[in-house]
Amino acid sequence: MKRLLALLFATVITSFGIAGSTFAADPQAGREFKPINPPLASPKDKIEVVEFFSYGCPHCSDFHPIIGQWAAKLPKDVSFRRVPVSFGRAEWARLSKIFYSLEATGDLAKLDTAVFIAIHEQRVAFKTDDAVFAWVGSKGTDAKRFADAFNGFSMQSKVQRADQDATAARIGGVPSLAVDGKYLINNEAASSYEDLLRITDAVIAKARQERKGK
């Protein structure tokens, strides 16, 4: 598992080794971001930031509290959405279903961070659906209600749609950020997770100016 994670997320772990990012106030294609063409579907009334992530990704676990604090302070014209990706692997599709099930039952705020901790600190192995249900129940959540959401008719389509969006955005690893459906932030331009978010802020400002110019 560790070897697979290292291979899939190598792009991300190496991309934050640059000392001192010097991105310009006006972010440039090919430097701070990569155009998404055709663009992803995006709200008309908000500049949406999408975080592609996986509970199985150790870098996403490290990034989670940082981007959470950032998202809590976004201006009113910006929205934030998380999209779990599986890279076509059944084990990670199960993790995507955990996210969507917690979201459906209203337990995401309660157990979101706990899922990361369980996987990366406590080494809990979510190798079967029953193992997931047992863990959720141990956290004081209604396991049956969660299981109903997990096994719901629309769950598989949600997971597939998330992977389709990730493919359309041409992400090379997670975490990856997309802005306004049109710009994929270039992780290699950042020296740290905080720097990645500063670049994202600059691309948000670019998207805002473009919207005003319409």
Image: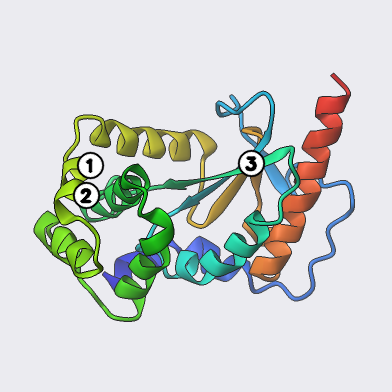
Name which of mark 1 and mark 3 comes first in the sequence: 3
Q: How crowded is mark 2: few (under 14 residues within 10 Å), some or many (20 or more)?
A: many
Q: Mark 3 and mark 2: span between their CA atoms?
A: 26 Å
Amino acid type, callout 2: Phe
Left or right of residue 73: residue 107:
left
Q: Mark 1 and mark 3: span between their CA atoms?
A: 25 Å
Q: Mark 2 and 1 residues: CB-CB less than 8 Å, in contact?
A: yes
Q: Which residue is drawn at 46% across and 35% down?
A: 165
Residue 132 x %, y %:
18, 60
**Which label sits on residue 149?**
1
Q: Foreground residue, 106 or 27?
A: 106
Q: Residue at x 55, y 52 (%)?
A: 176
Answer above or below: position of 148 versus 123: above
Residue 169 x %, y %:
53, 37
Q: Mark 2 and mark 1: span between their CA atoms?
A: 5 Å
Q: Mark 1 and 3 residues: CB-CB less than 8 Å, in contact?
A: no
Answer above or below: position of 166 versus 65: above
Taking the view exactly as shown, the residue that stands out farthest to the top is: 214
Q: Residues within 10 Å of mark 3 (few under 14, many from 20)?
A: some
Identify the element where label 3 is drawn: strand
Amino acid type, callout 1: Ala
Q: In which quarter of the image is residue 28?
A: top right
Q: Mark 3 and 2 residues: CB-CB less than 8 Å, in contact?
A: no
Q: Circle 2 is placed at which residue position?
A: 146
Q: Circle 3 is placed at which residue position?
A: 79
Taking the view exactly as shown, the residue that stands out farthest to the bottom is: 122
Residue 17 x %, y %:
65, 74
Amino acid type, callout 3: Ser
Left or right of residue 188: residue 12:
left
Left or right of residue 113: residue 20:
right
Answer above or below: position of 154 versus 92: above
